[in-house]
């Protein structure tokens, strides 16, 4: 009799304990942020981390009665690590959303986990077109490389650039850049006369640039991931390629705001196409850049930061719209079709493709108040991912 009473009491206590932790769980909304904070892509992780924290500081750490918990994990830019971390975040931490993803292979490695666990996966950095097709739970707030590449291939031939050599990192976004730039340039009456690919890890641009110098095209079109642009610029200038009459053009990853001001005056007048510039002239962007620099010892936000900031907006508003319910399918539905003003300009999450629709800007490097910026001079409005119309 006594033993039974004891057992019953224990069962009640255990049940009560379970209820308390379930309630704690229910009151918390967890975002698992997987970014590279070490290794070759570390600047991408640092920019996104800073931007997500800024968003929380500005918008509060609770939404619809839920406390927002941001769990930040460093994957070093290695897909196997990202996959293991994503599994742990889903199974052990029971995160409501997965976010971040500094490289295309990482976004693709985590996609099956998002699908199996019905967890929304917010792509804040990676930009290969195909990513959104890897899981119905993927939403993208970064950009797509075909958007940037097509914008540049429309601008170049109208501005005296007909014969071009392409130089890209040899993986997903680089292959997209090469293909979409080449096809569109040809369509517009220009021509890619040589396509060069450099390894993603530890690239040495010197032999490739020497080859470009020998070919002497009107322009060299470059895609390298965020963080590698300064090395390309340095070696391009060291070889005197600008003086030899070869123009340097590319997607905006090349004149990355994270590095641009340290590239020196040799970067002046380089034209790139991209969805975000820290010099974007809107009141909202000015406020964003000022707050970001203030919170991060003067660090200028780049396009990775904006992908992270807007990703947090999409998550916050989905949670608000579902009144804190937090289930994967309901959140996903509330993320699709969101339309808002981003520091980049107007932004829309296409409900059909779950991909970002936004403006593509042509920009030229200029000096403003003694600092180098990508100054926007033309715009292609509301561009969808050209890769989605295949
Ligand atoms: C990707 C990574 C980058 O750093 C970038 O600038 C563009 C694309 C990617 O891996 O998808």
Image (cartoon, rainbow, N blue to C red):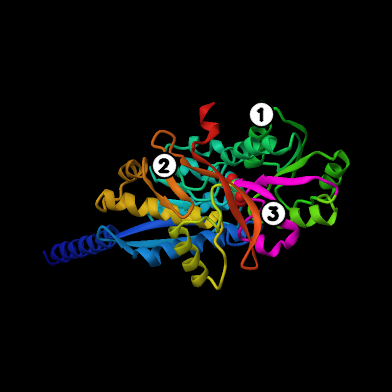
Q: Label 3: which residue?
A: 229
Position of the N terminus by quadrant = bottom left
Where 133 falls versus 377 (above or below)? above
Residue 381 as seen in the image, left or right of residue 189:
left
Label 2: how many Cα within 10 Å (few below 14, some 14–19, many 20+) = many
Q: Nearer the viewer, mark 3 or mark 1?
A: 1
Q: Verify whether residue 256 appears in magenta.
A: yes
Residue where numbered disc 2 is placed:
349
Sequence-first disc among 3 and 2:
3
Q: Residue furthest left?
A: 1
**SS assignment at label 3:** helix
Residue 95: image location, x then y, percent: 39, 54
Mark 1 CB lies closer than 8 A to ligand 1: no
* Res. 188 mark: 1
Between marks 3 and 2, how big is the CA–CA gap?
A: 28 Å
Q: Horizontal placement of 261 versus 211: left or right? A: left
Callout 1 crowding tier (Cα within 10 Å): few <14, some 14–19, many ≥20? some
Compare residues 152 and 314 and report the one nearer the observer.
Answer: 152
Q: Earlier in the sequence, mark 2 or mark 1?
A: 1
Q: Residue 163: name its quadrant.
A: top right
Q: What's the distance in space between the residues labelled 3 and 1, CA to CA? A: 27 Å
Cα distance in 3D space between marks 2 and 1 = 29 Å
Circle 3/circle 2 CB separation < 8 Å: no
Of residue 368 and residue 344, the one placed in the foreground of this image is 368
Q: Is mark 2 within 8 Å of ligand 1?
A: no
Residue 16, how many percent across, how many down? 20, 63
- Confirm or deny contact between disc 3 and disc 1 (CB under 8 A): no
Q: Which residues make up the magenta segment?
A: 244-273
Quadrant including the C terminus: top right
Q: Using residue 90 as the reference point, say whether residue 190 is left or right of it.
A: right
SS of the residue at dot 1?
loop
Left or right? Give the position of 134 relative to 157.
Answer: left
């Amino acid at each position: 009799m006594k033993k039974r009473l004891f057992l019953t009491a224990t069962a009640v206590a255990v049940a009560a304990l379970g209820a308390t932790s379930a309630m704690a769980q229910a009151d918390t909304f967890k975002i698992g942020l997987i970014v590279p904070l070490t290794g070759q892509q570390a600047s991408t992780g640092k920019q996104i981390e800073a931007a997500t924290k800024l968003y929380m500081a500005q918008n509060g750490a609770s939404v619809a009665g839920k406390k927002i918990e941001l769990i930040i994990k460093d994957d070093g830019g290695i897909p196997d690590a990202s996959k293991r971390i994503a599994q742990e975040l889903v199974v052990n931490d029971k995160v409501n959303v997965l976010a971040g993803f500094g490289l295309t292979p990482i976004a693709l490695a985590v996609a099956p986990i998002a699908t199996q666990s019905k967890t929304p996966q917010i792509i804040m950095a990676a930009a290969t077109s195909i990513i959104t097709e890897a899981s119905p739970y993927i939403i993208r707030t970064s950009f797509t490389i075909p958007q940037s590449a097509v914008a540049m291939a429309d601008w170049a031939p109208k501005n005296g650039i007909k014969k071009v050599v392409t130089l890209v990192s040899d993986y997903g976004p680089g292959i997209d850049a090469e293909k979409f730039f080449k096809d569109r340039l040809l369509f517009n009456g220009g021509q890619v006369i040589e396509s060069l690919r450099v390894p993603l890890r530890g690239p040495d641009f010197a032999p490739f640039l020497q080859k470009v110098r020998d070919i002497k095209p009107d322009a060299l079109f470059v895609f390298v991931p965020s963080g590698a642009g300064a090395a390309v610029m340095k070696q391009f200038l060291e070889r005197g390629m600008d003086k030899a009459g070869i123009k340097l053009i590319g997607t905006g990853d090349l004149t990355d705001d994270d590095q641009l001001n340290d590239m020196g005056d040799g970067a002046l007048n380089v034209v790139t196409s991209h969805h975000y510039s820290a010099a974007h002239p809107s009141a909202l962007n000015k406020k964003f850049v000022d707050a970001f620099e203030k919170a991060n010892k003067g660090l200028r936000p780049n396009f990775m930061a904006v992908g992270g900031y807007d990703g947090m907006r999409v998550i916050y508003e989905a949670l608000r719209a579902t009144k804190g319910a937090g289930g994967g399918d309901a959140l996903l539905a509330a993320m699709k079709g969101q339309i808002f003003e981003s520091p980049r300009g107007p932004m829309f999450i296409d409900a059909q493709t779950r991909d970002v629709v936004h403006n593509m800007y042509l920009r030229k490097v200029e000096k403003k108040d003694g600092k180098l910026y990508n100054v926007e001079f033309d715009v292609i409005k509301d561009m969808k991912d050209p890769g989605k119309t295949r």
